[in-house]
Every structure is written in C-alpha cells, then in structure tokens.
Image: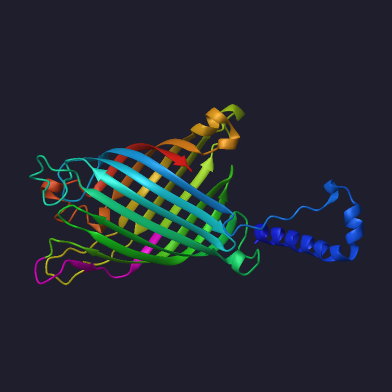
Amino acid sequence: MPFRSNIGALVVAFSMIGSFAPGHAADVDELPAKATPKPVAPVPFFYVNDNRLTYAYMPNGTDPGVTASTAKQAYAFTHFDAWAYGTNLINLALYKSDHNDPAAPCTPTGRTGCAGASDFYGFIRSTFGFNEIFNTKAFTVGPLRNVSLEVGADAGVENNPLAPAKRSGVIGLMFAFDLPYKGFFNVAPLYYKETNHSSFLPAPSDGTLDFRGTWALETNYYMDLGFLPANMQFWSISGRAAWYGPKGPGTSVPGTVNRTTEFNSEPIRLTLDASKAVWGDKYSHFVDVWVAYRYWKNKFGLDNNLSPSCTGRFVGSCVESSVYSGVTVKF
C-alpha cells in the first residue's frame, strides 16, 4: 500500500510532534505564528473519486431477431473510485433504439408508428489488490503491477417483445500490467453465472432462463499517445474485449438452442482530451470527444450460424459491427 502507508507515516509523525507540545506551551506561544505547525488533513477514504456522463451515437447497431440495422443512442453514467485495498467501477447506461427495433407490443415486422425499444443496462466490478491486502510487493514482477480478487454483477432489462431481464455475477482474478505512457492492460479470468428471461418460451414455462455457470475472460487497456509532440499530447487510445463461454440452453423446453461462446469488444477508441487542448493540463479529461469501433459476435450467446433469431430473414442480426462516437464530461 505505498500511497496509504506513506500518508499514514506522515500522520503518525505529526501526531508525535503534537504529543510533545503541552510540555513546551510557553515556547510555542513565543514562536512566530508562521512557525506553528498546521493541522494535517485527514486522508480521504476514497483517494480517487471520478464521475462522468456520456452521450454516444451508433448508426449500425443490431438486435437478434430484428431484420434491419438499428441506430442507437446511449446515455451513460460512470463512477470509478480507489481506496486502500482496491477499486470500484460502476456503469449505468440507457440505450434507445430507432423504429427498426420497436418496443413491445409492436414487432419488427409490424413496426409502423412504434417507438424504438429502450434497453437499460448496468454493471459493477470491484477489485481487492493482493499487494494492498497483504502489505507486500510480492505481486509486482516486471510489468505486472498487481494481482487482485475481482467480483462483479450485471443487470439489464429491455421493453422489446422478448422482454429480457438479465442478471449475472462474476468472480475471479485480475492481473494488472503497466504499459508505456502511463498506460495499463488488465486481464481477468472469471467464473460467470447468468439468469435471464424470454417471453417466447411456451407454457408452462414462466420465461425464466437459468443458464449453467461458465468461464469468462475480460480485458481492457488504456494508453496516452505520449510519443506525439508536446503540443499534441491530448490524444489517447483505449479498448476492451470479453469472451463468455457456452452456457447451455437455460431451460429444459424442447427445441431451445444451446448458447455458444460470445465475443463482445471495443478493440479501439481514439479519444481527444478536448478540455486539456483548450484550457490546459489543469482541466485534463474534463471533456473527452471520442470515436470507437464496436464488434459483438454471437450477441447474448446466440449462435450466429444456428439460432433461429440469427438466421433466415434475421441473418446478421446477432453480429454487431459499427463505428460510433460520443462525448464524455467529468463532474
């Protein structure tokens, strides 16, 4: 715990100085005011606390079972914090589709005059660093900065005819690596368990899909483009990729197709730190403008080559491939 242990040592040192003060009260009174030690500010519980709002637009989104590509708008709130033993990341997002992906009770084949579906999705990921927990540097080797226990959960609902209601949890390890120019690369092998809902399951099913546990691998990276000239160092790149293993059909209803390995990624995002470019380093990442590429194969685990929601007249609806862009504001 280098950050917290150093601050703690300073606090102890100043408290020891204070403990001797009563024995020399007269001496202190005779000192100039500027020589009186200032109180040490308490160390905050969260020494990083970052909150952001994002608006993004994707022109070529997809949804399984929807025949045409779907434009989507996204509104998101993201929170990140760091404390003595780890980190927390929370993301809450609302995705609003155009008329090609209609809200219930309309269907994609009868969508005239129907509003687009709204999809609310949120997740949390928390880490507990082994270096911090055990007060050691044993988990720092070469570019490896730390190994952490990672836990998390996802939840989402959408008001389309399928009426999905996803709930999932993950637990595993995260390996954090350093990259040049203040960058990082994280990789997390995880255990993944999901339940969901489908209104298309026949009676007597209540629509519940209880998938078997499977493996997952989540990765993400970030790096400033520090090799650029000094007057252009407000660009950065980032990205993520995640694989979720086969999880079965989720139900015993005959004819339900097994879910296959799902690949969900944003391999690259190019970000302009607009506030730094305009107002200087003091306002770095207060306003970010970015463009990214998204690739999502076998959406929700539906096999792009076998699932009825992805083949025939729905061919291509289970693969999302789109450039999109947005703006993120820190507050």
Quick check: is 209 in the magenta stretch?
yes
Q: Residue at x 57, y 57 (%)?
A: 46
Quadrant that contains the N terminus: bottom right
| Apparent side of residue 141 relative to residue 327 in the rendered image (left or right) | right
**Relative to the observer, which residue lies in front, 121 or 28?**
28
Q: Residue at x 9, y 69 (%)?
A: 203
Q: Which residues are magenta?
A: 202-217
Q: Is residue 229 above or below residue 250?
A: above
Quadrant housing residue 53: top left
Q: Residue at x 62, y 59 (%)?
A: 141
Q: Residue at x 27, y 41 (%)?
A: 72
Q: Is residue 79 above or below residue 330?
A: below
Residue 122 appearing in the image: yes
Residue 226 appearing in the image: no
| Apparent side of residue 22 relative to residue 187 in the rendered image (left or right) | right
**Relative to the observer, which residue lies in front, 182 or 83?**
83
Give percent across and percent down for residue 329.
45, 40
